[in-house]
Amino acid sequence: MAVLAKTFLSSKRKFNRSIVTAINRQQIVEAARECVGTPFKHQGRRPGVGLDCVGLAIWPVMKYGMDVDIPAANYTKIPDPARMQQLIDERMDVVHGDPQPGDVLWIAFREIAYHVAILTDQRTIIHACEHIRSRVIEHGYRPPWTNRVIRVWSYKGIGSWQP
């Protein structure tokens, strides 16, 4: 995990389209899986040290040089859903069909949307959750999780799944 933190800290560089077009959905999922076990930290942006759900959602493409950072100061522990949607809509494409591996799912609890997760395949999701083990976890993507998804985003310029 320390290598991930070092990589993250050195990844603060400008957007490079040639790097981004080389990223595919498998790399997004693999980068998210590298974060499993990272402690939950509200507004965290350092894999291996601390991540929240947004930090996890942006890490996989930032690792490869894409600048999609959502500044941590722009949301509270239970963020305003409209503001959070705006921040993510500005950085990602809304998916209008079925979610694909590597997509970011917007999840509502008690009818309020404030959590995001990465879909790994049609059976699992990865997310940083304070209320479930207080760390980044991967678990089944089935009800009630599937019923809580209210929006899906895809990273801009990301290629298809390439196993």
Image (cartoon, rainbow, N blue to C red):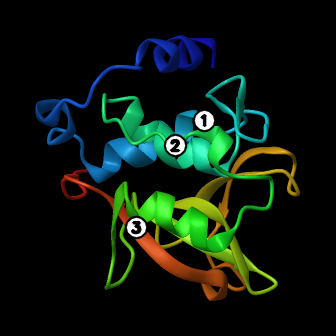
Q: Nearer the viewer, residue 149 or 29?
A: 149
For mark 2, give the secondary structure. helix
Q: Is residue 35 above or below residue 139?
A: above
Question: Which mark is on residue 32?
Answer: 2
Q: Which residue lies under the disc numbered 1? A: 35
Question: Which mark is on residue 149?
Answer: none
* Residue at position x 71%, y 39% in the image: 43
Badge 3 crowding class, 10 Å Cα cut-off, few under 14, some 14 to 19, many 20 or more, is many
Query: Quick check: can you spot residue 124?
Result: no
* Residue at position x 54%, y 11% in the image: 6
Query: Quick check: can you spot residue 63?
Result: yes
Q: Nearer the viewer, mark 1 or mark 3?
A: 3
Q: Amino acid at mark 2?
A: Ala
Could you say where residue 90 lies in the image, as x and y percent from the top left?
37, 59
User: Label 3 vs label 2: CA separation?
Assistant: 16 Å
Tell whether 49 sits left or right of 161: right
Q: Is residue 87 above or below residue 58?
A: below
Badge 2 crowding class, 10 Å Cα cut-off, few under 14, some 14 to 19, many 20 or more, is many
- CB atoms of marks 1 and 2 within 8 Å: yes
For mark 1, give the secondary structure. loop
Could you say where residue 3 lies in the image, as x and y percent from the top left?
55, 12
Pick whichever of labels 3 and 2 is earlier in the sequence.
2
Q: Amino acid at mark 1?
A: Cys
Q: Which residue lies under the disc numbered 3? A: 153
Give the quarter of the figure containing the N terminus: top right
Q: Residue furthest left?
A: 18
